[in-house]
Image (tube, rainbow, N blue to C red):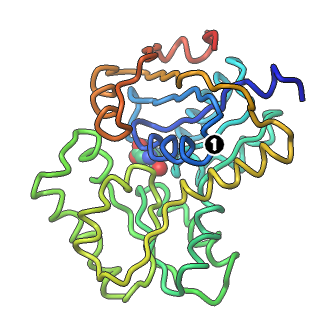
Amino acid sequence: MTTETRQKRIGIFDSGIGGLTVLRELYKQLPNESVLYFGDTARLPYGTRTQEEILQFTNEIIGWLVKCGVKMVLMACNTSSALALEKVKSKFDIPILGLIVPGANAAVKQGKRIGVIATPATAASNAYRHAILEADPSVQVWQVGCPYFVPLIEQNQLHDPYTYQIAEEYLTPLIQQQIDTLVYGCTHYPYLEPILRSILPKSVNFVDPAVYLVEVAAKKLEIMNLQNDKTPKPTKFIVTASPEKFADLSLQWLGYRPIELQEISLSALLDQPISI
Ligand code: DGL
């Protein structure tokens, strides 16, 4: 690959700030890579949308990222990975990677009684159940759809006693099943870690699929000779609504306020790539 191709950005997208947990992991494992981060804040939450909507949004976003000239796309959204990855990935001629299979493969290495917390759409798709049982048919899987988590996280209400109460409610069936492993089936959920750890028995292992998605991405870049060996550019952030709120939450979760943050309209998403 030419240096110019290797220097291209990796596109990362989510409905909102959930994908920042993937971006944090990318900064750790692939510090040389430049990123274009897309948060579809005008249309979140994705987790209560229909499959048709998820498919449409995913197609639009990846199509736009490709037009902008990214070299790879990381779906930093489990809902899109569960409902759309298999349908869209063959449409584009760059690698498109999702969270489900890397997360499932990691989970079966950690335990035998696996709980998955996810958005209602991801849980209903059974994508994690299928991927986990394909990786190891001898394990048991329980999935819980958690409709309130994403809105509470996006509204920065982690310290509200109501959030703890809701978390207890969602985790009770998993505690009853004596899970030994918990998979974050939504990229927003790692922000809940202190709350979840305080509710679950200490012995439960936590699996963050973001870690393993980035490992897969690193291998893919190496195989395709696509790694950037020059100094990376600062991450460029694009959102479809509320850039101020996104910047505040980025400061909190990523540790810095995005310098390059732009809002684009949903109509621009269809036909106006930006220069990256
Ligand atoms: N963070 C995304 C996921 O992993 C989307 C959550 C949502 O918007 O409901 O599923």
Identify which residue is drawn at 52% across, 21% down: 236
Q: Is residue 30 above or below residue 116?
A: above
Q: Is residue 225 left or right of residue 217?
A: right
Residue, disc 1: 30
Q: Determine the image quadrant of residue 26.
A: top right
Q: Is residue 244 left or right of residue 189?
A: left
Neighbour tally class for label 1: few under 14, some 14-19, many 20 plus, Cα within 10 Å? some
Q: Is residue 13 left or right of residue 93?
A: left
Q: Is residue 3 above or below residue 16?
A: above
Name the quadrant of the N terminus: top right
Q: Secondary structure at mark 1?
A: loop
Identify which residue is drawn at 26% across, 78% down: 172
Q: How far from the left and from the top, in percent, is residue 35?
A: 59, 29
115 or 197: nearer the viewer = 197
Q: Is residue 118 above or below residue 31?
A: below
Q: How far from the left and from the top, in percent, is residue 77?
A: 52, 46
Q: How far from the left and from the top, in percent, is residue 262?
A: 44, 14
Marks counted in the figure total 1
